Amino acid sequence: MLLELKNTAVHYGKVEATRDISIKVPEGEIITLIGANGAGKSTTLRMISGLVRPSQGEVLFEGESIAHLDPEDITDLGIAHVPEGRHVFPQMTVLENLEMGAYLVKSKQEMKNNLESVFEHFPRLKERVKQFAGTMSGGEQQMVAMARGLMSSPRLILMDEPSLGLSPIMQQEIAVIIKEIHAQGRTIILVEQNARLALSLAQYGYVLETGEIALEGDAKKLRDDEGVQRTYLGMD
Amino acid sequence: MGLDILPQTIGNALVLGSIYAMVAVGLAIAFGVMQMANFSHGELFMVGAYCVYVLYTLFGWPFELAVIASFPIVALIGVIYERLIFRPTRGNVLAGFMATAGAGFILQVLISEWYGVGLPKSVQVPYPGGSDFLMTAISWQRLAIIPVTIAMVFGLWYFLTKVKDGKALRACAQDPEASVLQGIKLNKMTALAMAISGGFAGVGGALMAPIVSVNPYMGHDYAIIAFIVVIVGGMSSIPGAVLAAFILGFIHTFVSTFADSVYGMMIGVLFMAIVLIVKPTGLLGNVKV
């Protein structure tokens, strides 16, 4: 198991954001967390990457507890977090954004190799290396954020709402890129409100409701589940 | 009062703008990275001046060496500020304000205890004489400030745009949380920002030591001007701080020359008010560090 959450809870002050979340992420798979706004999807990702600490439970990466580590050390272990809302560095060029993604990469050669492999996924960024990230469209910024996450050659990538606010065409483009990244053997946790997209990409899914796991199962099984269809896929 | 004093006044304005830039750039970079204002930035400037007084006047070091030494000495004070004040109060602007204001008083009292308050310290002028060209007569001592400022601002620009940790500093100013997710250590970056901030203020004070009267309270005026400059330029913008420093340098010099210095200050503040009405974020307010 690459990553395992055991009965974790997160509190913001006294408010409980998530409780009793247990998730298993096997190496090489895409796992998705779906659910409505405020269900605790982003909080769970923020807990994995160390931005918030669990108030209960364990976070195990390759069997080692990482819950006490700072985010920068968790990044160093090989977990990249592509945050919700892109969070690119707006007044830095695309290239500078990618360099920051490789902040912990020490060797120049490795950084160059990573840059080249990232440009294979995102040829559009290669033409725009000098453009300020803040002047790009939402879809392009999403690409910058994803490419930046890949620059540290992570073992596990957390993607928070990559399709949010994008046109259907751009959503499809992002989906294709996620497939490509996965095909290279990377493990991905995908958080999405677009359940249809998420369940078409993932092998296994968790449905979060008000901070708890309401349902889990193979992505195919969830797609066929009546409740999921009604609530998240807009089918009657 | 004719056109013949124009070159002289422009020269004076460039000198003044340079010194404003040295002090304001440090304030802007610290604010950019921490979103916290150092209300004793002027005291760091003052300590820089005392570095020259102690090392050059009392110990007899070469002036240049004393100025160079002021950078690491005051940078170290900046780092101590970061560790003891800004890190514990991160995110709490009011606490940072109170604590830095208090630290400023501590520095004033310490310097007063060690070197006295009474007579201003006179630092002998290391570069006597002055310019005698283009109808200007500006002492070498003042003129020297311009190239030093250019070199230091260029050095800072190089660091921020070409060096990895400099870029990381900009990243932290633009989005701290996203920076942390890239593996950048926020504490290291805020310490770095305060080191640069202190170093620039220190060298500014060091360069001014032979020109103004050195006393424990000398930093006050410069701190106020630095705040005006940074507000006009756009709080966390370094290009904005440099631009605003020279604009205010020209306003203060020209109005002081053709009217008097109280009007100079008044019109400078009026200019700030107008900028804030027209563009509340400051001249280059959306251009972060």
Image: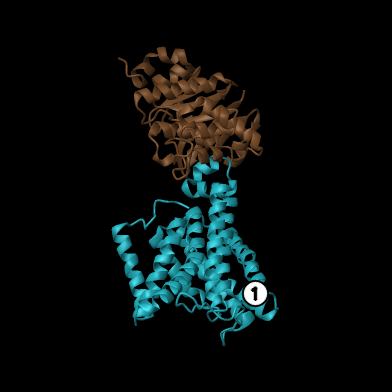
Chain colours: A brown, B cyan
Q: Nearer the viewer, residue B264 or A9?
A: B264
Residue in the picture at 33% in, 67% down: B271
Q: Nearer the viewer, residue B236 or B180?
A: B236
Kindly give the residue lying farthest to the bottom in the view shown: B119
Q: Nearer the viewer, residue A185 or B143?
A: B143
Kindly give the residue lying farthest to the front in the view shown: B134
Label 1 sits on residue = B63
Q: Nearer the viewer, residue B282 or A109?
A: A109
Residue B244 location (% of width, % of height):
41, 63
Residue in the picture at 47% in, 61% down: B37
Q: Is B146 above or below relative to B33?
A: below
* Residue B236 in sight in this render: no
Mark 1 surroundings: few (<14), some (14-19) or many (≥20) residues within 10 A:
many
Q: Callout 1: residue from which chain?
A: B
Q: Is B171 above or below relative to A157?
A: below
Residue B206 location (% of width, % of height):
58, 72
Q: Is B260 above or below relative to A15?
A: below
Residue in the picture at 50% in, 43% down: B177
* Residue B211 in sight in this render: yes
- Dividing the image into 4 quarters, which one contains the N terminus of chain A? top right
Q: Which amino acid does the dot numbered 1 rest on?
A: Phe
Q: How many marks?
A: 1
Question: In the drawing, does residue B51 fall left or right of residue A205?
Answer: right
- Dividing the image into 4 quarters, which one contains the C terminus of chain A? top left
As helix, strand or loop, the secondary structure at mark 1 comes to helix
Residue B64 location (% of width, % of height):
64, 71
Residue A24 location (% of width, % of height):
56, 23
